[in-house]
Image (cartoon, rainbow, N blue to C red):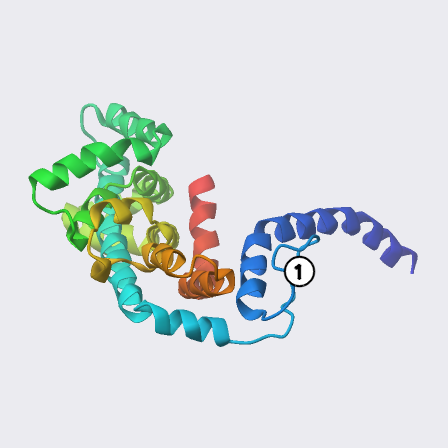
């Protein structure tokens, strides 16, 4: 009994802090979900109401019928899928070159890649938009995807993952006659699976929730992804906060479910990057 009491006293402060941080970080989603499902009560009451009063799915159905959510959803799938696939290909190739290959200026190139991490992405909007205009790629999904493929964080993450692979494995494969492409495809990529999964989730979440860049490039509502489509919903129902909240929940749910299913790979990938 004394041991149990001691353990509770030692764990209580730690888990209380974790619960407080968890509530603070999840509060925006919980409030939005409660607003979308509730049909009564003051939305802006203090303290906020996190459990919906008179739960209903009416607002979600109204959001689905008011704007083409299905089309926005498939646009998001197309943009996010192409961005994730392209980012994994480019980041893995660059990370492998910076980690395994040896060439003059290798460290300088890696430092230059890291330096771009401190630049806010908003700085690139004007340059990228002018470039896309010259290439006649504005108002297209290709124009949205192309500037997102060069991902400095992805290159860093995969370089760290490839660094964790013992050099003796590559040397043994080279002695057996494996080409550099076979080393990359059959040795490096399988061993860097968790890092690839983590990068895929990072890229998917960032692309799925992005709205500034797609809103700049796309002018036709038919090509809007979900995040931009929800802004379209706010213009249609400026006074219907619960309908807007329902549209926001529909936007978040797919990527949230995917994250929960793949969180094990996500944590393993980050663990390798931190080392």
Can you see residue 197?
no
Residue in the foreground of this view, choosing between 107 and 124? 124
- Total labels drawn: 1
Residue in the foreground of this view, choosing between 161 and 200? 200
Residue in the foreground of this view, choosing between 103 and 63? 63
Q: Residue furthest right?
A: 2
Quarter of the N terminus within the rendering: bottom right
Mark 1: few/some/many CA within 10 Å (<14, 14-19, 20+): some
Q: Is residue 274 above or below residue 6?
A: above
Report the residue at 58% width, 58% height from top: 31
Q: Secondary structure at mark 1?
A: loop
Q: Is residue 161 above or below residue 31?
A: above
**Residue 34 locus on image (x, y percent):** 58, 64
Q: Is residue 13 left or right of residue 139?
A: right
**Residue 250 locus on image (x, y percent):** 42, 66
**Residue 133 locus on image (x, y percent):** 11, 40
Q: Is residue 182 above or below residue 166?
A: below
Can you see residue 73?
yes
Q: Which residue is mark 1?
A: 49
Report the residue at 66% width, 60% height from top: 49
Q: Quadrant of residue 234?
A: bottom left
Report the residue at 22% width, 38% height from top: 97
**Residue 208 locus on image (x, y percent):** 35, 55
Q: Is residue 66 left or right of residue 266?
A: left
Report the residue at 37% width, 54% height from top: 231
Q: Residue furthest front?
A: 239
Q: Quadrant of residue 162?
A: top left
């Amino acid at each position: 009994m004394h041991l149990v009491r001691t353990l509770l006293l030692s764990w209580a402060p730690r888990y209380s802090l974790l619960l407080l941080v968890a509530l603070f970080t999840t509060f925006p989603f919980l409030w939005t979900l409660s607003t979308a499902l509730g049909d009564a009560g003051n939305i802006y009451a203090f303290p906020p109401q996190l459990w919906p009063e008179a739960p209903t799915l009416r607002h979600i159905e109204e959001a689905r019928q008011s704007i083409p959510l299905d089309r926005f959803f498939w646009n998001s799938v197309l943009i996010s899928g192409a961005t994730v696939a392209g980012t994994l290909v480019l980041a893995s190739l660059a990370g492998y070159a910076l980690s395994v290959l040896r060439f003059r200026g290798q460290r300088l190139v890696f430092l230059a890649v890291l330096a771009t991490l401190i630049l806010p992405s908003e700085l690139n909007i004007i340059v990228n938009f002018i470039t896309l205009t010259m290439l006649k790629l504005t108002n297209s999904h290709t124009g949205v995807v192309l500037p997102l493929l060069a991902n400095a964080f992805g290159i860093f993450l995969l370089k760290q993952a490839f660094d964790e692979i013992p050099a003796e494995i590559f040397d043994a494969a080279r002695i057996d006659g494996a080409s550099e492409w076979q080393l990359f495809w059959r040795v490096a990529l399988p061993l860097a699976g968790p890092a690839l999964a983590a990068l895929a989730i990072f890229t998917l979440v960032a692309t799925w929730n992005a709205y500034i860049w797609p809103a700049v490039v796309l002018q036709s509502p038919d090509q809007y992804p979900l995040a931009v489509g929800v802004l379209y919903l706010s213009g249609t129902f400026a006074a219907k906060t619960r309908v807007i909240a329902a549209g926001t929940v529909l936007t978040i749910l797919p990527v949230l479910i995917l994250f929960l299913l793949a969180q094990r790979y996500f944590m393993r990938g980050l663990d390798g990057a931190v080392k």
